[in-house]
Amino acid sequence: MDKTFLKPLSIAVLASILLGTAGCGPHPATGGLPGGAGGPPPEVAFITIAPETLPVTTELPGRLDAVRIAQVRARVAGILQKRLFTEGAEVKAGEVLFQIDPAPLQAAYNSAKATLAKAEAGLKQTQAKADRYKVLVEYNAVSKQDYADAVAGAAKDEADILAGKAAVETASLNLGYASVTAPIAGRIGKALVTEGALVGQNEATELAVIQQLDPIYFDFTQSSADVLRLRRALENGSLKSLAPGEAKVNLVLEDGSVYPQPGKLLFSDISVDPTTGMITLRAEVPNPERWLLPGMFVRGRLEQAINRDTIAVPQRAVAWGPGGEATVLALKADNTVESRVIHTETAAGDKWLVTSGLRAGDRVIVEGLQKVRPAMAVKPVPFTGDPNNASAPAQNQGK
């Protein structure tokens, strides 16, 4: 083969290889790194950690109970004639709910009045006789025995009058009980008997139930161990006690929404349930719109104390590792990212209370976390929105 022909071919192949190698070299627009990794640093928004005063909040489950419950019962026997209320409606105290047939009760009342009138008429006769015999016995015109009998007869008629008055009063009360009224104001449930039923025969028949719903009670329990831990923290000064009457309870409903009106803690029980080790607590919650109903299962966020000069970080800035460790991305002095392992104690609203891993003055990234990794240089800007709102934009976001 002609060596003069191979020489130019080898030169051409070598030139092609060199040109291909040059195409894989550093690119001036990317700073020498493929894929644009050498472009401008990503922008992140940060907050500067500062000591805060936050309430110590405990979230506990419980159920709602009516403040007052009244069972409407028939107090006299009779046939139920009418139901005078709308089931499920609000009723006022003293409002007539049922009407029992008053005719037999009216007859008993009239009979009692007649018996009283007869006793009063008899007293007039016996008293006049006793007064007349009192004068005659002084002149021995009648015997002392006749006079004593006349006085005793008058006294008997006086007793009959007292008994008659009591019978009239009883009959009047029974006649009034024919109109069954609401003992308390509140919301009434369904009628438990229908018209035409015989009620009050040998027992006080239950007719309906009224429950007072505004305000409403929230009954829940807390472990005695948690109560002891809180008291120790209050005694050593790490927590400050709330002033009397300031302990608030916010309710979280079954759908996850927060009830708009906070309640107040009324009391905690004076004893511990020996079977569960729990202490019962009760809160009173306003319920003007009747959103809350007895028997509902809710969770209560109870503010039990004040934690001063505490370090807190938004929950959205915290990531949890497979081993359960909590980490945040913080900014170093040269604006590079570092991962910090933190220890959290409890939640206060939308923040985690941090016991170690962060201190005042540290800068923690809350926006743009998905764009960065440890050791990466970034362009930090102060966060101007709500750090607990995941949709809040950072200052100069997208520039």
Image (cartoon, rainbow, N blue to C red):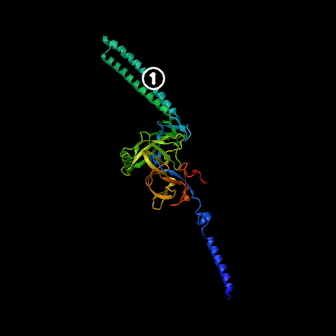
Residue 211 can be seen in this image: no
> Between residues 6 and 329, which one lies in front from this camera angle?
6
What kind of element bears circle 1? Answer: helix
Q: In terms of image quadrants, where is residue 169?
A: top left
Q: Nearer the viewer, residue 229 or 83?
A: 229
Where, by quadrant of the figure, is residue 372 drawn?
bottom right
Q: Residue furthest bottom?
A: 1
- Percent position of residue 35, x then y: 60, 65
Could you tell whether 279 is left or right of 36 in the image?
A: left
Q: Which residue is the extreme one toward the top?
A: 139
Q: Residues within 10 Å of mark 1 (few under 14, many from 20)?
A: some
Residue 259 x, y percent position in the rendering: 52, 45
Question: What residue is disc 1 on?
Answer: 117
Task: Classify residue 284 as left or right of residue 140.
Answer: right
Q: How many marks?
A: 1
Quadrant location of the C terminus?
A: bottom right
The x and y percentages for residue 271 are: 36, 46
Q: Quadrant of residue 162?
A: top left
Left or right, residue 179 beside residue 136: right
Q: Nearer the viewer, residue 378 or 72?
A: 378
Q: Is residue 289 above or below residue 110?
A: below
Q: Amino acid at mark 1?
A: Ala
